[in-house]
Amino acid sequence: MQWQVPLFDPDLGEAEIAALTAVIRSKWLTQGEQTERFERSFSGFVGSQYGVALNSATAALHLALMAHGIGPGDEVICPSLTFVATANAIRYCGAQPIFADVASADCWNISAASIEACISPATRAVIVVHYAGYMCDMPAIMALAARRGLKVIEDVAHAPGASLEGRAAGNWGDAGCFSFFSNKNMTTAEGGMLTTNHEDVAKAAQRLRCHGMTSVTLDRHKGHNFSYDVTDLGYNYRMSELNACVGLVQLEHLTERNAKRAALTACYRHTLAARGLVGVPFDKAPGNASFHIMPILLPAHVERSAVMAGLRDRGIQSSIHSRPIHTFSNFVGTGGDRHPLPLTDMIGGRELTLPLYPSMTEQQVELVCDTLHSLIGG
Ligand SMILES: Cc1ncc(COP(=O)(O)O)c(C=O)c1O
C-alpha cells in the first residue's frame, strides 16, 4: 500500500550505503570489529560501562534475565501494555510473568506502587518499559527494588536517548535492553544491545550470545585462540558487522532525530488539545523523552477499527500499541493477570498510534489531526 503518511519512515542514506559497502569489501561479515566499535559507542552514549550487541532486544531481555539467574519458580513483574517480547523473554527462562497495571490515565508506565502490589515471595525481578519513549519513575522504582531485593531490567526498545535526572534510560537498572528493529528511533534492520554496569552480567551475555563458547570466531581468526570450551547452554544471538556498521551511522543522528520527534509531538499535542476530542497521555512525563510513537486515547464511544479504516482510506497509516499481553490466547489462563489491570484494559481498548517519524512535516501532522477529527465527529 502506498501511504500518503506512513506510520514510520526510517532515515537511511548514503552514509549507511558507504558503511555497508566497506564492510562487504572487507569480507568480514560476522561479529567483529564494527560490532566492538558499535558496543563502545553505544554504551558510551548511554553512559554505561558495558554494551553487548545482540540480534534483537528480545535476545537482550532473555540474556539479561538469564545473567541474573532467573529461572523456574521465579516471578518477574512487568507491564501488560507492551509488546509481547517483554513477557516472552520471562517465559523463555521458565519463569512466570506477573502483570502490573500502569500508573494512571496520564502515565502509561508501571509505577513503584503498581509493582509493589504484585510482589510475592517468588518475585525476583522487574522489567520496566519506557512506553513510547517516556521515562518510568526510576528513582521510586529503584528505591523499591533496593528495599525488596529485586533486580531491575529496563526494556528500552522505545527509549534510546531518553533520560531522567541526567541519567539515560538503560543506565538506571541492572541492565538495559535496546531494540534496533526497523521502526525504532535508530535502526540496524534487526538488532539489539544490552547495557550494564555489572561486569558479570556483561560477561555472561557475551558468552550466552555465542553458544556459551569461551572464544569467538574473530579471536581464532586473529590467532588468539585455537580452540574453545562450552561452559553454558548458550544461543546464537550475535549481531553481524552489516548491522553494526549501520548502527554506528544511525547513532550519530539519534539526538538530532529525537529532537525532530519532540517538535512534531509538540505540534500534535497543540493541535489535538485545541479540539479536545481525544486524550494524549504523558502530559506530565518526567525527564526527557525519546518520542518513539504518538499514542492517543480515543473517546470510549468511538469504534477504533472504523477510525483506523477511515484513516487508511485517506492514505494515513495508524497502529495499536499494544494489545495487552494478558489478553493473547497464549497467555490466557497462565496466571499472569492475578492482579486487576483496569487501566491497562481501558487503554488497551481505546489506544491509537498516529504516524511519527523525523522527516514528517507539521503539515502532515495537521492533516492527520484534521482527518482524525473529521472521523470522530468533531
Ligand atoms: C517494548 C518492546 N520490547 C521489546 C521489543 C522487541 O524488540 P526486537 O524486535 O528488537 O526483539 C519491542 C519491539 O517492538 C518493543 O516494542
Image (cartoon, grey):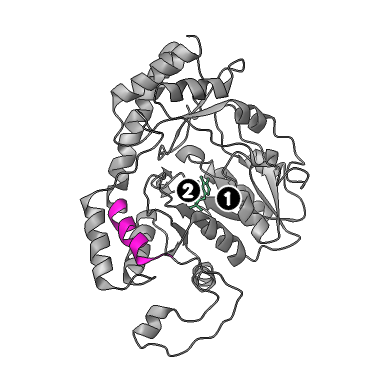
Principal secondary structure, stretch drawn in magenta: helix
Q: Which of 124 and 95 is in front in this view?
A: 95
Query: Can I make out residue 171 in this image?
Result: no
Quarter-of-image position of residue 368: top left
Quarter-of-image position of residue 21: bottom left
Q: Which mark is residue 162?
A: none
Q: Where is residue 273 in the image (x, y as percent from the top left)?
A: 43, 16
Residue at which label 1 appears: 85
Residue furthest to the top: 378
Residue at which label 2 appears: 157
The span picked out in magenta is: 239-250
Q: Position of residue 306 (x, y in %)?
A: 54, 20
The 10 Å Cα crowd at callout 2, few under 14, some 14 to 19, many 20 or more, is many
Q: Which residue is drawn at 37% across and 50% down?
A: 187
Q: Nearer the viewer, residue 27 or 181?
A: 27
Q: Position of residue 84 (x, y in %)?
A: 60, 46
Query: Can I make out residue 287 in this image?
Result: yes
Amino acid type of the residue that numbered disc 2 sits on in the rendered structure: Ala
Number of callouts in the render?
A: 2
Q: Residue at x 68, y 43 (%)?
A: 99
- Determine whether label 2 and label 1 are within 8 Å by CB: yes
Label 2 residue near ligand 1, CB within 8 Å: yes
- Left or right: residue 115 versus residue 153 is right
